C-alpha cells in the first residue's frame, strides 16, 4: 500500500493492487508513506519506522509525565518497565498500526489530564480531541471510547471541580493503564476472525 501511495500519488484512499483497501483506516499508511517520501524508499525498515518513532515518543511521554510528579527515579523505572514489556517491544518493531494508536491514546490522555489541571486553557482539550480523532484514523471504532472523557468535560463545564479530586495518582494510573487498555483491545480484536 505504501508503494502504491508513493508511486501513484493517491494518498486519500490506499490501494492494494488496483483495488481500494478499506479494511483498515489510513493513518498508519499515511505515516509510512511520509517516511517513504523523506527517505525516498518503501523498504521494510521505512514501513516499520512509524511504529518505532511512536514507541520512542510513548516512552518519552511516560518518562516526562511521571517525572513531573513522583520524580526522576520512578519515571526512569516506569519507562524501563514499559520498554521491557513484551507486547510493547513487539509492536514497536512491527510495521502495524498498534504503536501509532498507542501514541494517539497516550497524547490524548496526557493533554486531557493537563486540561483538568488548568481548565481555563481550553486548547489542551481541543488538542486532546485532535488526538482522539487521530486514534480513530489509526484503528477505527476501537478509538471511540477515548472520545468519552474529553466529551464529558466539554458537555459539563461545571465539572471543572473534577480537577480537585484528580490527583497525581490519576495521572500515573492513566499512563500505566492506557497501554494495558490498548493490549486488551488488541486481544479482543485478534480473537475475531
Image (cartoon, rainbow, N blue to C red):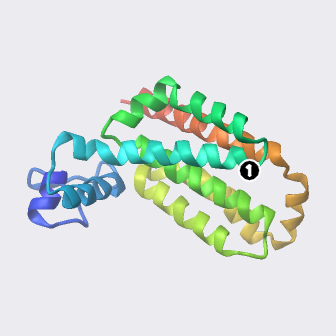
Q: In this image, 117 relative to 148: left or right?
A: right
Q: Which residue is drawn at 85% across and 67% down?
A: 160
Q: Which residue is drawn at 80% across and 62% down?
A: 117
Q: Residue 14 or 70: which is nearer the viewer?
A: 70
Q: Tell me if residue 14 can be seen.
A: no
Whether 145 is drawn above or below 112: the answer is above
Expressed as whole percent of the image width and height from the top left, the position of residue 130 reads: 53, 66
- Residue that label 1 marks: 68
Q: Is mark 1 on a helix, strand or loop?
A: helix
How many numbered marks appear?
Answer: 1
Residue 154 quadrant: bottom right
Expressed as whole percent of the image width and height from the top left, the position of residue 181 reads: 60, 37
Q: Tell me if residue 99 can be seen.
A: yes
Q: Residue at x 73, y 65 (%)?
A: 115
Expressed as whole percent of the image width and height from the top left, the position of residue 72 reads: 71, 40
Q: Residue 184 or 179: which is nearer the viewer?
A: 179
Amino acid at each position: 500500500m505504501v508503494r502504491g501511495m508513493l508511486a501513484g500519488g493517491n494518498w486519500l484512499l490506499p490501494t492494494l493492487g488496483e483495488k481500494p483497501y478499506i479494511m483498515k483506516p489510513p493513518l498508519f499508511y499515511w505515516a509510512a508513506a511520509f517516511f517513504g517520501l523523506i527517505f525516498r524508499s518503501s523498504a521494510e525498515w521505512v514501513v516499520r519506522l512509524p511504529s518505532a518513532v511512536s514507541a520512542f515518543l510513548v516512552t518519552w511521554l511516560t518518562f516526562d509525565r511521571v517525572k513531573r510528579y513522583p520524580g526522576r527515579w520512578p519515571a526512569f523505572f516506569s519507562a524501563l518497565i514499559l520498554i521491557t514489556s513484551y507486547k510493547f517491544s513487539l509492536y514497536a518493531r512491527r510495521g502495524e498500526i498498534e504503536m501509532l494508536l498507542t501514541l494517539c491514546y497516550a497524547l490524548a490522555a496526557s493533554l486531557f489530564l493537563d486540561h483538568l489541571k488548568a481548565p481555563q486553557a481550553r486548547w489542551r482539550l481541543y488538542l486532546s480531541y485532535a488526538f482522539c480523532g487521530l486514534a480513530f484514523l489509526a484503528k477505527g471504532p476501537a478509538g471511540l471510547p477515548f472520545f468519552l472523557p474529553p466529551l464529558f468535560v466539554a458537555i459539563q463545564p461545571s465539572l471543572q471541580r473534577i480537577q480537585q479530586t484528580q490527583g497525581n495518582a490519576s495521572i500515573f494510573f492513566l499512563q500505566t493503564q492506557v497501554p494495558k487498555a490498548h493490549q486488551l483491545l488488541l486481544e479482543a480484536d485478534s480473537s475475531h476472525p
